[in-house]
Image (cartoon, rainbow, N blue to C red):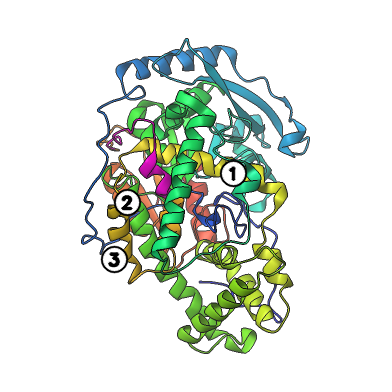
Amino acid sequence: MAPTPPDGALLREPPLTKIPFVPWPPPGRPAHEGNAMRTAAKYGAVAGLGSLLLTSVAVAPAGGTTTTDAAAHGTAVAAGRAAAAGIDFGRCPAAEKLPDTVRCGTVEVPLDYADPSGRRIELTVSRVRATGKKSQRQGAFVYNPGGPGASSMSFPLAAGLPEWKRIAEAYDIVGYAPRGVGRSAPLSCQEPEDFLKAPTQAPTHPSLAYKKERIAQAQAYAKGCAEKTGTALRHYTSLNNARDLDVLRAALGEKKLTFMGASYGTYFGALYATMFPSHVRRMVFDSAVDPDPEQIWYRNNLDQSEAFESRWADFRAWVAKHDTTYGLGATPEDVSRSYEKVRARLEREPAGGTVGPGQLHAAFLGAGYYDDYWPLRAGALSEYLKGNPEPLIEQAAPEPAAAKASENGNAVYTAVECNDAPWPEDWLTWDLDNSLLAKRAPFETWDNVWMNLPCAFWQEPRQQPLDVRAEPGQLPPTLILAAERDAATPYTGALELQRRLAGSVLVTEEDAGTHGIGGGSNTCVNKHLEDYLLRGETPV
């Protein structure tokens, strides 16, 4: 549950007590028309969407350049090269903004695994060496925070946090930027200053005119992705992210991989476990995406929108419980009215000239990911209604300095998701499915649509998702972590992943909704994480 607010309610982002696994861009900062909280792939499945039938889905070509035997051979070739070359770790470039205790390097991977001798790209890698005795060392521990579009280059800083101390004694703590992200052959689809243009709108029930405007924007965005990257764009996929992970394993000198993925990181981690089961040593899936091929990615987004409605209700109930602190209403309905009052005022007069309804909505989507943000967001609403807009501006205004990174994260998100699977190409399908959904789950539904709509106009070939699966004995035990009320990757996604990976064990944080729970504030979860990573022990 969310923390009890302190006297006066904190109004600034708290110092992080754990590595910020997701989302990208950072929580509470707006990205594309209020879509900041959607630029990480945080997907799962919940019941109740059977009535939302697809009427027109693009047919993906069988196989493709990254799903053939040639790609499997190319991965082996690239891994062999990487094992021979290793990684030359040295001082990190200034652009990474990392202390001297962290060392950086690069690893080469093929752009197209079906052509391993063709064009290669470099992925940036960061590392802190294990801090314990030589006899304690268990190898490299690689982490991915999700996305698509997020980097873990700062993950080695976790070695200095108490929650990670014992793990950091046993493992080299390794982060990296996946293909397309940061300095790893970066993708871009539009000018960064246009991407963070503000203020923007976020209508709960968009008009026909507004829908037409957003369709045109999605078409332009998809075109921009194609024009800026060319045919290389088709090689930014989850399958290639899994293959890159195996090349990174080899470059680190590891015969088998110890890996933890959060959110979207669980999806390509599951692909890795399916494609390279004999290369898995230990694997943690934190806040699991539903890997069912039928869910990737259109239906997962529908499910996520429905789940966010429950989290929005949780937040409003909590604020109402603390009405004496915030004065936003003694019932969830009263809190909704306070929120809508703020939205209406911002539509007339944006706070600070840049915080409109779109920026407000992005900030409050962040409250759906992190319970720790509940006092912050409630305090900002309270202060705004008292005549002080500064806390809301501080939490919701776009940051020009982050424009390039935010646009890059969104470009990678779009490219990977659009390439990964079939998407509806007929707007009527999107409109029907989401109009029905918005009747019972209006909070995130249309925001989710605008985030993903470029996939309706994608110019590159679509893949058929791999059937994630491991039979008994194929994998060592794997660990799944999930919060019961996680909206970004709903809990049924963890159940589905457990069903598909024989020998996996699921640890559930009950009656909790924070997204990304490993290494956080729950000591019980952390004990299971340590037992598994340090000794290979699972609760069952």
Query: Looking at the picture, does residue 68 appear above or below residue 444?
Result: above
Evaluate whether residue 153 shows in this view: yes
Tell me which amino acid carries mark 2: Trp
Residue 9: name its quadrant.
bottom right
Query: Looking at the picture, does residue 435 appear above or below residue 221?
Result: below
Disc 3: CA contacts within 10 A as few (<14), some (14-19) or many (>=20):
some
* Foreground of the two, 41 or 517: 41
Taking the spot 68% from the left edge, 37% from the top edge, the residue there is 131
Disc 2: CA contacts within 10 A as few (<14), some (14-19) or many (>=20):
some
Give the x, y percent position of residue 42.
44, 52
Taking the spot 65% from the left edge, 34% from the top edge, the residue there is 130
Q: Which mark is residue 436?
A: 3
Give the x, y percent position of residue 318.
51, 79
Evaluate whether residue 13 shows in this view: no
Predominant secondary structure in magenta? loop
Q: Secondary structure at mark 1?
A: helix
Numbered range of the magenta stretch: 452-467
Q: Which mark is residue 88?
A: none
Tell me which amino acid carries mark 1: Glu
Give the x, y percent position of residue 398.
66, 56
Q: Earlier in the sequence, mark 1 or mark 3?
A: 1
Residue 399: name its quadrant.
bottom right
Q: Secondary structure at mark 3?
A: helix
In the picture of the structure, the residue carrying the numbered disc 1 is 407
Tell me which amino acid carries mark 3: Leu
